[in-house]
Image (spheres, grey):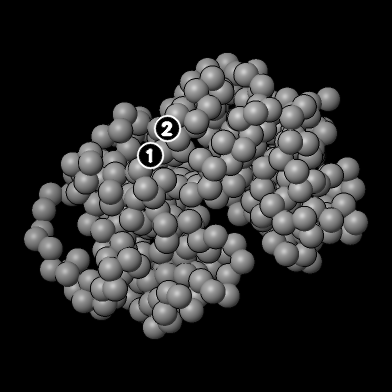
Amino acid sequence: MTKVGVIGAGAWGTALACAAQRAGNEVLLQAHEPEVAEAINRTYSNPVYLPNTSLDVNIKATPHLSDLADSDIILMVAPAQFVRATARQIKSFLKKETPLLVCAKGIELDSGKLMSEVLREELPEAEVGILSGPTFAIEVVNALPSACTLAMSNLSHAMEIANAIGSNRFRIYASDDIVGAQIGGAVKNVLAIASGMASGKGFGDNARAALITRGISELVRLGVSKGAKAETLMGLSGMGDLTLTCNSMQSRNFSLGVALGQGEQLEDILKVRKAVTEGVFTARSVCKLAETQGVEMPICAAVNRILNEGADITQVVEDLLSRPFKEEL
């Protein structure tokens, strides 16, 4: 039996613990808040992040990262902006042979680095993978069919891990495109906010479809500039994830965009949310990375102006619609 350690007992970390346990593994879930770990062990539920759901009694939780030292596989589900700090915390006990799968979607704010680049700096000997795709946590917990991408430089090892933690209800497709899997997961959060704004403003389905399609172009341009494969960005971790999060109120990023489009203030939306809305941070870091790469990303830039520069949504939309016509490709 494979020992799977999961860092982060938010909604997605808890969902991944459920998926790994169903695949026949021994699972230990680390919670930042001791009360969350205590609730999981005592009530077999996570009332803070996944209320009204039940967890298997075999899923155990701990508030201590060091308890994951004996894991055969570790899933790092800490939010993207905390990946570096978490890597420093586990450095003392992480074994060289233990694969570390990053399950956060984002780009580091200060450096503009991908999560794999952050880990290369902090844990240079670690074997790093990226697990990403169109997956809402509650549906994974409820064993509804889902699929995602596991990207690792060693493709055969990715297949081994996919077979270890995947199942017929949680299908994992292996890839060796680590960059592509990360760009798709990060940029889609920003585009989902844009899609939500369009819905909140009442612009209609035509506008949202156009925005998503043009957003894919931005996503692919950035990914290819970083060495990603275009076909990866048209797969589960790119277009698949984008399609999911741009069309559902289950998406924290989409729902935040809807609220902004309806006139709510960003600080008011965030202060009542327990879970992190990654796109708020990623908007700035995506634009920073795009500038470094010399890539034009007008939709992401517009979202960043609204979130981080106090720009008016209506004016930003008019600016986008006033851009010169150009060839589609």
Q: Is residue 239 in sight in this rendering?
A: no
- Residue 269 image point, x, y percent: 50, 75
The amino acid sitting under disc 1 is Lys
- Residue 261 image point, x, y percent: 38, 77
From the image, which quarter does the N terminus lie in? Answer: top right
Task: Report how far apart the C-alphas of labels 1 and 2 lie in the structure.
Answer: 6 Å
In this view, the residue in front, 304 or 251, is 304
Q: Residue at x 26, y 73 (%)?
A: 311
Q: Which residue is mark 2?
A: 117
43 above or below 239?
below
In the rendered view, does 105 fall on the left or right side of 202? right
47 above or below 60?
below
Task: Please give the count of numbered marks on the rendered protein.
Answer: 2
In the rendered view, does 216 fall on the left or right side of 267? left
Quadrant of res 230: top left
Q: Is residue 41 in sight in this rendering?
A: yes
The amino acid sitting under disc 2 is Glu
Q: Which residue is mark 1?
A: 113
Quick one: SS at disc 2? helix
- Crowding at dot 1, Cα within 10 Å, few <14 / some 14-19 / many 20+, comes out as some
Q: Residue at x 28, y 48 (%)?
A: 288
In this view, the residue in front, 294 or 122, is 122
Q: Residue at x 31, y 62 (%)?
A: 304
Quick one: SS at disc 1? loop
In this view, the residue in front, 243 or 225, is 225
- Crowding at dot 2, Cα within 10 Å, few <14 / some 14-19 / many 20+, comes out as some
Image marks 1 and 2: residues in contact by CB distance under 8 Å: yes
- Residue 186 image point, x, y percent: 43, 47
